[in-house]
Image (cartoon, rainbow, N blue to C red):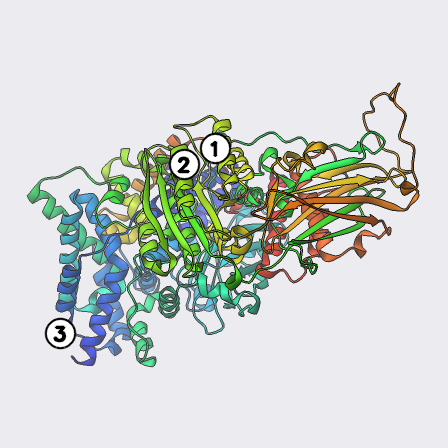
């Protein structure tokens, strides 16, 4: 009987709906019981899952006529209206409280202020649906006394009433010290196990004071590491409840702005901390991104609502006074029916039970190879980045990624590096650098850095794009088709009048949703994207055939001809045989139509299929886990994604036995080529896009350093290669590259040699050190046998000292991810 | 039109923008028909226009949901209940627009969860939706549904518990609650 009641109270406690008077008592019980704490976690997890599931509900609106009828009625004169000034008169407050509370709860005069605060909380719900939804990723306990704060002091005052708990001991909630006393008296010896929680709330604004919606907000416990990432809602507000007390720092970031951080935020048990406004300065480097990402209507509305939102308890009157102060402000616009989300969709996520349907090919780390046995190493460039965003997705669900989902070269190549572009008329420049290997001090690291030539957007050739969009039933989840639609809209907004778009959809059967259309008719294109809906099973191959057919019919000679495939990769009807699919794409790539594969969703990602398709289709593969990522791939790096400047780029290294004993290519496991393929122009290899950077690392064992490599017996009949004059030199290696112009079938050759100057690791360039940190992180995640002294701690040290200018703050995000991984590992 | 009228019209427009989607969704679950739900919501707003705004302003959400609910129940009584619309049916209803903002990492498991939700008793479903979709507090839900506050608490608790059981194994909480303490 009592237990049942207590159960319901526990749920109410977690949801923030337990009256203050009963809260302390429950907290004492929680503090004393591991079971109850587990229960709290489970309730919270279920609540989060339910919120997220319900957040995906569709929007509905009144018809135009219905709305007009309401507005007509609203404009009519009605009698008996109280002047606003009366709103704050105590008598009115009491009257309002009576009105609200009659039939609901008994109340006392002493509680009037509190009651009003609670009944006023619809102010929180007064944000438009858009804001509600955007607010959903905030953690579940958002409903802790969730009236927005007018000021911290306001909140601090509220809880300071003394109550008598069940134990008969006086219970006071406002400070941890006071609670500690109670807890220790109730359950002796457990005073340190306080689980009373606090709340942090803040607002992210731009320099004009307007709200920034969708800013990524990372909350870090200064002693234990990152706690979670959430995002600001349409009012620019973020709220994180149920935090263990302690010192926290908050970091807010948004593309187009410089990130801002606040540290030393003291979260006090049972209390509410209002963080000073985080004002993000504009970042001149990416100003254009800002314009694209933040749609004016949304900006206007969120800016305006941020005023009201700060004081939801006073929504009406303040809203009006705001309007008076700024007479030029238009009435709040209706939320656009399809607001372009200015949001990264990273958020607290509940782990999906469906991971096991994801497919990753097994990767074995490249081994050390003795130069005496094979001095050559041949591989193809890889500009894919999918593994990085996929890894990020895993970490944000609180899990380490499966080893085979970590492809180190894709981690390294996710980042932009400041390599010098070519000056000799070639499509790309190649740089080499060596330094000591930080995870194995007697080894050396070699970095090969390739930089594709930059082509300004207005000089890029016209594009003939065919969007091939998977609208099958499996795409119905909100992080799939809606995110695909939002991504494609971002891309369409980047197109110029000379570009063309066709849209092919495929589900139960393939269909042409939009014939090739000039990008001057943007509205028409956006409209088709908007009206896509999911249903049916995937018939991928027929869709692919149709897309390539359309691309061929609209082929632009000398232009960009590309199929952009957006799918969760679940090709399960039609040509399900991967080999057949790959042959189809390989054939089409020869015709000059290239492929970009964008992977979406979770739980169903056929990572291996997509990577192979992109690989064989002269293309690239990115995993889109959020609009943030979509913007990076389709807006910031549109040139690299769309405009191929060199294809079939292969590298072959020959190491000098006089200086190098053994070597190991870090990553690129599935890009390794047979040596004879290097000179074979029929053998496909990777592409480089405009402005792309490609980085490869070799770990080198210098001559004179012992290495334990499984040895094959020495050859009996062959002469061992005698060192010649060349090998007498101090050269480390010779690098040869082959590439083709995008429309050529014959390759060109480049050749470079490098000597090692015995540079120490901390003297290496910033980019070198950062790429090394990323590689090291990948090895830790993969638990590579070659990781040496790599550890999350070391990665953090190396990465933090090599952030460089960090445009787009992706390196800072990397640091957060490493900390998160360390945290997850420690919790296991 | 004088200032007071202009202010009022502006206020109604704001409220309309903020609540119409949520109310239509809510009403549709009762009426089982999207067009009827739209009518109910229009009527709710017309009633709001005739109210003294100062009497509704500070408890606007419970007021709107309560009026909307009563109106929808009236209609259902008169016209006979239909199958309640679930989320998938709502998404297919004419005029539905999905909102990419909501594309927050839900998953296949989210759909499973919604299916389980639809299996719960109607009274539990209603309060769970009001709590987790509309973000109303227990007291506000009590005002909307005429259940007592403690009854709301029991309904939510029981509902969540049912979902938890069926959802098991429940994943580790990821939002940095006391599990990290």
Establish if A526 lies above or below A282. above
Q: Quadrant of the N terminus of chain B?
A: bottom left
Q: CA distance from mark 2 to mark 1?
A: 8 Å
- Provide the secondary structure element on which disc 1 rests: helix
2 vs 3, front mark: 2
3 vs 1, front mark: 1
Q: Earlier in the sequence, mark 2 or mark 1?
A: 2
Q: Earlier in the sequence, mark 2 or mark 3?
A: 3
Of residue A72 and residue A267, the one placed in the foreground of this image is A72
Query: Is residue B46 found left or right of A405 in the rendered image?
Result: left
- For disc 1, the neighbor class at 10 Å (few under 14, some 14 to 19, many from 20) is some
Write down the residue under mark 3.
A80
- For disc 2, the neighbor class at 10 Å (few under 14, some 14 to 19, many from 20) is some
The spot of residue A344 in percent (x, y) is 47, 54
The spot of residue A189 in percent (x, y) is 60, 43
User: Marks 3 and 1: same chain?
Assistant: yes
Q: Earlier in the sequence, mark 3 or mark 1?
A: 3
Query: Is residue A544 found left or right of A229 in the rendered image?
Result: left
Q: CA distance from mark 2 to mark 3?
A: 69 Å
- Provide the secondary structure element on which disc 3 rests: loop
Contact flag, marks 2 and 1 (Cβ < 8 Å): yes
Which residue: 13% across, 46% down? Answer: B73
Write down the residue under mark 1.
A584
The spot of residue A558 in percent (x, y) is 51, 53
Write down the residue under mark 2.
A545
């Amino acid at each position: 009987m009592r237990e049942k009641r207590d159960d319901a109270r526990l749920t109410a406690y977690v949801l923030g709906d337990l009256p203050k008077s009963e809260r302390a008592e429950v907290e004492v019980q929680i503090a004393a019981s591991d079971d109850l704490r587990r229960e709290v976690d489970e309730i919270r997890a279920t609540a989060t899952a339910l919120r997220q599931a319900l957040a995906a509900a569709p929007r509905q609106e009144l018809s135009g006529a219905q709305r007009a009828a309401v507005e007509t009625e609203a404009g009519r004169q009605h009698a008996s209206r109280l002047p606003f000034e009366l709103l704050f008169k105590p008598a009115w407050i009491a009257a309002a409280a009576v009105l609200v509370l009659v039939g609901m709860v008994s109340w006392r005069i002493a509680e009037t202020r509190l009651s009003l605060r609670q009944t006023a909380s619809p102010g929180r719900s007064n944000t438009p649906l858009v804001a509600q939804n955007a607010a959903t990723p905030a953690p579940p306990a958002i409903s802790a006394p969730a009236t927005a704060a007018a000021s911290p002091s306001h909140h601090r005052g509220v809880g300071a009433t003394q109550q008598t708990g069940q134990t008969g001991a006086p219970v006071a909630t406002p400070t941890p010290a006071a609670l500690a006393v109670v807890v220790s008296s109730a359950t002796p010896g457990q005073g340190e196990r306080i689980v009373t929680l606090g709340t942090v709330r803040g607002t992210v604004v731009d320099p004009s004071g307007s709200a920034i919606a969708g800013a990524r907000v990372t909350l870090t416990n200064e002693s234990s590491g990152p706690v979670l990432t959430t995002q600001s809602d349409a009012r620019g507000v973020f709220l994180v409840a149920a935090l263990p007390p302690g010192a926290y720092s908050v970091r807010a970031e948004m593309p187009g702005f410089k990130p801002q951080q606040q540290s030393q935020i003291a979260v006090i048990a049972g209390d509410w901390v209002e963080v000073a406004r985080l004002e993000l300065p504009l970042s001149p480097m990416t100003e254009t991104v800002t314009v694209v990402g933040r749609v004016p209507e949304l900006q206007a509305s969120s800016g305006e609502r941020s005023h009201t939102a700060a004081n939801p308890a006073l929504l009406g009157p303040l809203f009006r006074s705001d309007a008076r102060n700024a007479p030029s402000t238009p009435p709040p616009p209706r939320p656009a029916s399809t607001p372009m989300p200015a949001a990264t969709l990273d958020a607290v996520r509940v782990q999906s039970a469906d991971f096991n349907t994801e497919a990753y090919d097994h990767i074995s780390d490249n081994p050390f190879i003795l130069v005496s046995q094979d001095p050559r190493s041949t591989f193809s460039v890889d500009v894919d980045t999918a593994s990085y965003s996929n890894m990020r997705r895993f970490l944000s669900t609180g899990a380490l990624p499966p080893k085979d989902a970590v492809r180190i070269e894709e981690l390294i190549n996710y980042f932009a590096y400041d390599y010098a572009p070519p000056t000799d008329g070639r499509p790309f420049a190649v740089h080499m650098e060596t330094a000591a290997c930080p995870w194995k001090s007697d080894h050396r690291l070699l970095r090969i850095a390739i930089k594709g030539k930059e082509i300004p957007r207005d000089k890029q050739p016209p594009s003939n794009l065919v969007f091939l969009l998977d609208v099958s039933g499996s795409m119905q989840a909100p992080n799939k088709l809606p995110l695909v639609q939002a991504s494609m809209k971002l891309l369409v907004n980047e197109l110029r009048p000379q570009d063309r778009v066709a849209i092919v959809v495929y589900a139960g059967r393939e269909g042409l949703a939009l014939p090739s259309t000039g990008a001057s008719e943007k509205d028409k294109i956006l409209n088709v994207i908007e009206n896509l809906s999911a249903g049916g099973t995937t018939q991928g191959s027929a869709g692919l055939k149709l897309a390539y057919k359309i691309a061929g019919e609209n082929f632009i000679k000398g232009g960009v001809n590309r199929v952009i495939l957006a799918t969760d990769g679940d090709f399960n009807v039609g040509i399900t045989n991967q080999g057949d699919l790959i042959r189809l794409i390989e054939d089409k790539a020869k015709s000059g139509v290239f492929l970009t594969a964008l992977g979406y969703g979770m739980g169903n990602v056929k990572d291996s299929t997509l990577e192979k398709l992109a690989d064989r289709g002269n293309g690239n593969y990115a995993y889109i886990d959020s609009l943030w990522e979509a913007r990076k791939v389709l807006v910031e790096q549109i040139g690299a994604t769309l405009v191929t400047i060199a294809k079939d780029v292969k590298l072959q290294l020959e190491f000098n036995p006089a200086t190098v004993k053994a070597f190991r290519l870090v990553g690129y496991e599935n890009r390794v080529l047979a040596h004879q393929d290097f000179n074979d122009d029929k053998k496909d290899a990777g592409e480089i896009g405009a402005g792309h950077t490609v980085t490869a690392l070799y770990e080198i064992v210098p001559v004179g350093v012992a290495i334990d490599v499984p040895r094959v017996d020495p050859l009996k009949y062959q002469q061992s290669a005698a060192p010649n004059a060349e090998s007498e030199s101090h050269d480390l290696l010779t690098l040869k590259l082959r590439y083709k112009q995008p429309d050529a079938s014959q390759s060109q050759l480049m050749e470079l040699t490098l000597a090692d100057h015995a540079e120490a690791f901390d003297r290496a360039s910033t980019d070198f050190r950062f790429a090394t940190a990323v590689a090291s992180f990948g090895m830790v995640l993969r638990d590579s046998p070659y990781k040496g002294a790599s550890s999350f701690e070391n990665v953090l040290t190396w990465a933090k000292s090599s952030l460089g200018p960090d445009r787009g703050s992706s390196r800072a995000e990397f640091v957060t991810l490493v900390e998160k991984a360390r945290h997850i590992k420690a919790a296991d | 039109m004088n200032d007071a009228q202009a202010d009022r019209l502006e206020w109604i427009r704001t409220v309309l923008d903020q609540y119409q989607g949520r109310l239509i969704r809510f009403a549709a679950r009762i009426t089982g028909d999207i067009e009827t739900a739209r009518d109910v919501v229009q009527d709710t707003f017309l009633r709001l226009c005739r109210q003294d705004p100062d009497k509704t302003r500070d408890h606007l959400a419970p007021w709107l949901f309560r009026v909307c609910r009563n109106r929808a129940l009236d209609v259902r009584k008169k016209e006979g209940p239909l199958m309640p619309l679930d989320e998938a049916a709502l998404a297919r209803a004419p005029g539905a627009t999905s909102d990419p903002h909501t594309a927050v990492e839900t998953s296949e498991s989210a759909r499973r969860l919604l299916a389980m939700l639809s299996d719960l008793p109607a009274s539990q479903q209603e309060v769970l939706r009001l709590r987790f979709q509309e973000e109303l507090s227990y007291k506000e839900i009590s005002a909307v549904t005429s259940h007592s506050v403690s009854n709301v608490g029991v309904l939510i608790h029981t509902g969540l518990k049912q979902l938890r059981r069926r959802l098991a194994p429940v994943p580790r909480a990821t939002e940095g609650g006391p599990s990290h303490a």
